[in-house]
Amino acid sequence: MLSLLEQIDQGALWPYSGGIHPLENKHLSNKSNIDRLPLADEFIIPVPTVGQNCILKFAVGDRVLKGESLTEGNGHLPAHAPTSGTIKAIEPRASNHPSAFSVLSVVLSADGKDEWLESINLPSEELSNEQMLTRIRESGIAGMGGAAFPSHIKLNPISDIELVIINGIECEPYITSDDRLMREHAEDILKGMTYIDALLDPLRFIIAIEDNKPEAAKAMNIALAKFGALASKGRVTVVPTKYPSGGEKQLIQILTGKEVPSGGIPAQLGVVVHNVGTAMAIGEAIEQRKPLIERVVTITGENVTRPGNYWVPIGTPIEHLLNSVGVRDKRNVKLIVGGPMMGHMQIDLSAPILKGSNCIIVPSISEFTTESNERACIRCGECAVACPAGLLPQQLFWHSKAEEYDKAASYNLKDCIECGCCNYVCPSDIPLVEYYRVAKSAIRKEEQEQIAAEQAKKRFDARLERLEKEKREREEKAKKAAERRKSNMSSGDKGAVAAALARVKAKKSSEGKSPEATSDKQSQVAAAIARAKAKKQVQQSEDTQSEHIETPANDKKAQIAAAVARAKAKKLAKQRTESDESIEPASDSTASQQPVLDKKAKIAAAIAKAKAKKAQKETNLTGESESNSSLEVSEENIAEQASPEELKKAKIAAAVAKAKAKKAQNDNKETVVEESVFIEKKPEIELSAEEQKKAIIAAAVAKAKAKKLAREEQ
């Protein structure tokens, strides 16, 4: 049994399921050689390219040269200036994409000189594999078959590569750019293949070309014969024309009989696939340092005046291309970027040409069938027969339309290559590929959100772990510091610390008894309030009594008021004594102040005694003087008006007042006078000094009256 490599050498082919045979219409553009169009006045270079992040090297107003890198950054695929000129703006512009979203772009105003960067086209030196990969990356080489995948990644696989396929199959209708490139630049393609051979060192090379391109196959065979090293392990293989034979997975299955696993890549089978245009760009990048700044684009369609293939700088606006080749009916311009099967409608004509833009179709009104309304699926099953990936398009459609994306994913939605075969054969005109694209985008978004959530959770867990670690380190540090302080502490310091701790504990325990302490304080406050009220009432009584005494005509009433005041004072003193007895003993701080209060009381008592004696003496000496004539008149009036019974009572009252005054003088040690308050016998009974003074005066007046009455009787 022959091995796989022997079968490949004999040109063996393997069939694959599905596929269709649409109208080719390649004759419109493959009759003439590749031409060039005038440079546009303005170029739009999207950044970043191919979804990579990068940093702009220039600002608005800077001048750049042809081939100069506009961006920089590690690992990214740079964009280059397609011609020399000045950067006019850096702003969002319309994108060459089905979404038509605006992307950040560098707007370059061409100066018409088309001046190259000095480092371009210099003689090439011997390079290592690593240096060649770096130059390929810095030149911005990407897959030119439509996917625009970075080539330096494909040329640096992890596993060993046994087979390299140079894809020259243009299975899409209308597109002829690769056909004309192989016819006119076959040797340039082979030069690029030599560098691929040096980087990958495969066992075999296959240049795959469809049987509807005999001129291209002939040109490649002639060029291959000139490269002896490649000719020994390479061959040109012609495959039957069928759409989509040019798909990477389908082409591998045709040439090797192997099927790329779901979710896998060709490198897992030891196979790498490159487009013929990509191979040529790799050779130019390594030999001439030429970056990927232009490509061959097929401009075709019945509405185009001069259809053909043209070298178009990357970033050229589509509108400029249409104006250059001419459009027959400018009122009905419908533009398709790419082939009719996998391309997309482009509404904004200011969008630029990209590295993966291989064709622009401008059809006439009658060239393509008019769009029809979507109808209900009749479950004919034609889509499943035509699917080259062996999927179930009908099931994928139902789940995608119902937004059951998880179920659609279970039917291997990711393996759909969006070739459009199912759309082509569907009798209900259902845009199946559009449903699949929406479902893929939703699944991709969910996966990105899930990845972001997982990364956020990892960051959160890492943060918690870090905080816990820092906490343990702080605790350990504090513990060690406490141990050091304890070891360095003397016995006296330890005693002071113990005493401080004891005080803190005692304070906490006293705070725990706060309700009782609060009750004692409230009792003391209540007692103070009671004493203040009694004092106030006595003061008010004395003020009233003094007002009556000052009037000589109301002497009798004064005596009565004095007696009433004394009775009230005595009653209040008694009440206060009872209230003080109900109050708990004062605190230690009050007891400590008692000697000072006793001393003040003795001084106040001595002052009161002196005032009393002075008042008595003045009353006896001036009882009959002219200065007190008003008093004598009042006394005589009182004596004349008073009855014997009243005189007797007055004598008794005078005797009682005199006895009280004498007793007050003899009991100074037991009397406490504090802040003009007079207390009799017990410290708890308080009488004001004013009351004592008035009582003495009343007693003197009574005594004078008694003497006068006695003289009159005699």
Image (tube, rainbow, N blue to C red):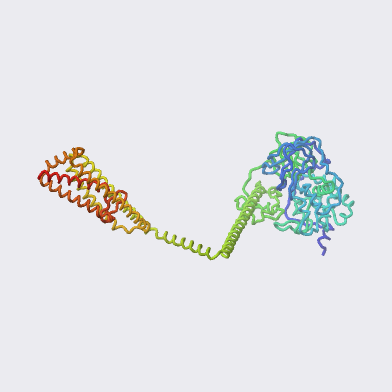
Quadrant (top left/top right/bottom left/bottom right) for the N terminus: bottom right
410, above or below 338, in the image = below
For image coordinates 23% across by 43% down, the residue present is: 546
Q: Position of residue 153 (x, y in %)?
A: 76, 53
Towards the viewer: 433 or 702: 702
Quadrant (top left/top right/bottom left/bottom right) for the C terminus: top left
Q: Position of residue 176 (x, y in %)?
A: 79, 44
**In the picture, residue 268 is in which quadrant?**
bottom right
Q: Position of residue 666 (x, y in %)?
A: 24, 54
**In the picture, residue 122 is in which quadrant?**
top right
User: Disc count in the image?
Assistant: 0
**In the picture, residue 392 is in which quadrant?**
bottom right
| Residue 691, visible in the rendered structure | no
| Residue 261, visible in the rendered structure | yes
Q: Position of residue 503 (x, y in %)?
A: 46, 61
In the rendered view, does 192 fall on the left or right side of 457? right
Towards the viewer: 605 or 675: 605
